[in-house]
Amino acid sequence: MTVQESVTTRTGVERVVEFAFRLAERRGGTLTLCHEKNILVEAGTLWQSTVGELSARFSAVPVDDVHVDAMCFDLPTTPERLNVVVSDNLFGDIITDLGALIQGGWALPRV
């Protein structure tokens, strides 16, 4: 049996989410939270509640919420609907790789 833990702190999530809100505010766009709360219930709840609480300070920024599997569908098919995406490292790593591949900036070796 193997158990692996990921530590997510409120302080860390607040820093990332606040940065994302400020960026969305400057860009005049929507902040999209990408998570998988149905699987990572506690971490997803922390991210969702933090976005919800900080949204009061950034009332001009619309907030959207999407599961990572839906994001992997939305990003290639309707990338224009996304402006600023905030996520934890696990999901962020996956969707940035997908985004790089879509825009042609991530070189894959041809075999």
Image: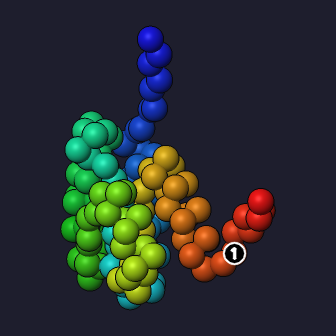
Residues 20 and 65: in front is 65
Q: Tell me which residue sits at (47%, 16%) in the image.
A: 2
Residue 101 shows up from this direction = yes
Q: Tell me which residue sits at (44%, 18%) in the image.
A: 3
- Residue 33: image quadrant is bottom left
Q: How many marks?
A: 1
Residue 46 shows up from this direction = no
Q: Tell me which residue sits at (41%, 38%) in the image.
A: 9
Instruction: Where is residue 32? Give x, y as percent.
Output: 34, 69
Q: Would you place residue 28 above or below residue 109 in this image?
A: below
* Quadrant of image for the C terminus: bottom right
| Type of amino acid at the residue the image marks with label 1 | Gly
Q: Tell me which residue sits at (41%, 44%) in the image.
A: 11
Instruction: Where is residue 61? Give x, y as percent.
Output: 29, 79
Residue that protrudes farthest toward the top in the picture = 1
* Quadrant of image for the N terminus: top left
Q: Rate crowding at label 1 as few (under 14), some (14 to 19) or many (20 or more) other CA atoms within 10 Å.
A: few
| Residue indicated by mark 1 | 105
- Residue 102: image quadrant is bottom right
Residues 37 and 23: in front is 37
Instruction: Where is residue 85? Give x, y as percent.
Output: 42, 68
| Secondary structure state at the residue bearing disc 1 | loop
Residues 37 and 26: in front is 37
Residue that protrudes farthest toward the front in the picture = 111
Residues 55 and 86: in front is 86
